[in-house]
Amino acid sequence: MHGSPPSLQAGDAPIAGDEFPLMLGPTNEAPNLRQLTTRKGEIVSPIVLGTASLGSVDPTGLFGRRARAHAFGLLDMAFEAGCRALDLARSYQIGGTERVVGEWLRATGVRDQVFLLSKVGHPIPFLAPNRLGTPSLRRDVQATLDALCTDRLDVLMLHRDHDAVVLSQLAADLVGFRESGRTRFTGTSNWTYERITKLEATSTDPVVQASSPQFSLAAWRAPPWAGATSISGRKRRYERRLYARAGLPVFAYCALGQGFLGRRGRDAAAFHQKLNVAARLRAETLARTHGASVAQVALAYLLRQPFPVYPIVGVSTKDRLLENLGATALELTPDEVRWLDGGRSRENPVDGQLPEVKQWTEVKQWTEAKKWTEAKKWNA
């Protein structure tokens, strides 16, 4: 689906002479993440199921039993629909998410038919701001494997970065987890590209085989969580070019902008800004052109990047899940992707640019009166 990264277009920022070298990804014939495959070698959908809301901190009692039943129902539904890649973390529900997914895997016996990504080393505010030392990582990895009732992950990622970490030791730990068979691939979540490159430079073996920043058609106004990173929006275009040059796969969280790019255009505070309103309007235009939904266009935009992108989405109903999976069949042209990104296309993907007045009218219909005033000032 994602062939070799294309050459840069005229007008793109130069890559030669970067402040930091491109040293990412496997340098040998080792397996890579150009496709998501299970331990049995089966290819699964590139749409990844987000699990942060599944399970509960306390599995006992009425609330815990209800959370377990809900999680089992959603996981059954996703598996049957073909969404068999799961994004997890040791910190989700303080271990409750991994626990309930592990119970489901044990009950169904489908471990070898799903793709498991989990993240470890999340800081504990004030108490343990840096949990990337060897003892903490080993405890987290073992706890994750035990909770998930498995002997190996498909991808193991560091959940956060910290300035005080010794990068050479961290690289050795990640390579060690992979060589010991505890994970097939290793990577980082919420690390900047520059830090990823510095980590990779400390080892002769591949260390960062995938990354998980926030990435969507909508860029957040400010990170909603401490230590979170993003490659979305105009300000991060250069970083995305570096990802393309390196061919570094991305597991993109908040792929629909916390619902901002969903069916109802939920007013997610972190994502509601003027540039995102314009991006949603462009997505709505292409959705009408292709007979698709806004969410499908937003996910197809990610899937058509010049580097492998696996959107992470959370759903609660089968209809929404099937809608998201339908994005894999939506073919966007390079011009359409460029236009969605707010850039000029060689040929307009729609019949002419949207007139300013038409944009005003649609924004007014879609947003509240106060936000219509802001959008009108912006478009004037």
Image (spheres, grey):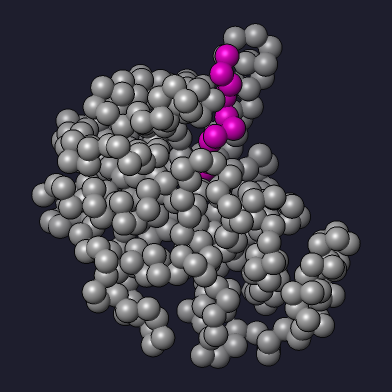
Q: Position of residue 25 (x, y in %)?
A: 23, 56
Using residue 151 as the reference point, say whether residue 181 is left or right of it.
left
**Rendered image quadrant of residue 298:** bottom right
Q: How many marks?
A: 0
Residue 122 visible in this rendered orientation of the protein:
yes
Towards the viewer: 227 or 338: 227
Query: 62 above or below 331?
Result: above
Query: Is the magenta region chiefly helix, strand or loop?
Result: loop
**Which quarter shows the N terminus?**
bottom left
Towards the viewer: 130 or 236: 130
Residue 105 visible in this rendered orientation of the protein:
no
Using residue 245 as the reference point, say whether residue 160 is left or right of it.
right
- Write the residue at 69% across / 75% down: 285
Towards the viewer: 63 or 18: 18
Q: Is residue 225 magenta?
A: no
Using residue 55 as the reference point, say whether residue 17 is left or right of it.
left
Q: Position of residue 227 (x, y in %)?
A: 46, 43
Question: Outermost residue toward the right?
Answer: 369
**Which quarter shows the C terminus?**
bottom right
- Write the residue at 73% across / 52% down: 266
**Rendered image quadrant of residue 281:** bottom right
Q: Position of residue 170 (x, y in %)?
A: 23, 37
Using residue 166 as the reference point, say whether residue 298 is left or right of it.
right
- Write the residue at 40% across / 39% down: 160
Which residue range is magenta in the image?
48-58
Q: Position of residue 82 (x, y in %)?
A: 50, 46
- Write the residue at 55% across / 85% down: 344
Towards the viewer: 97 or 344: 344
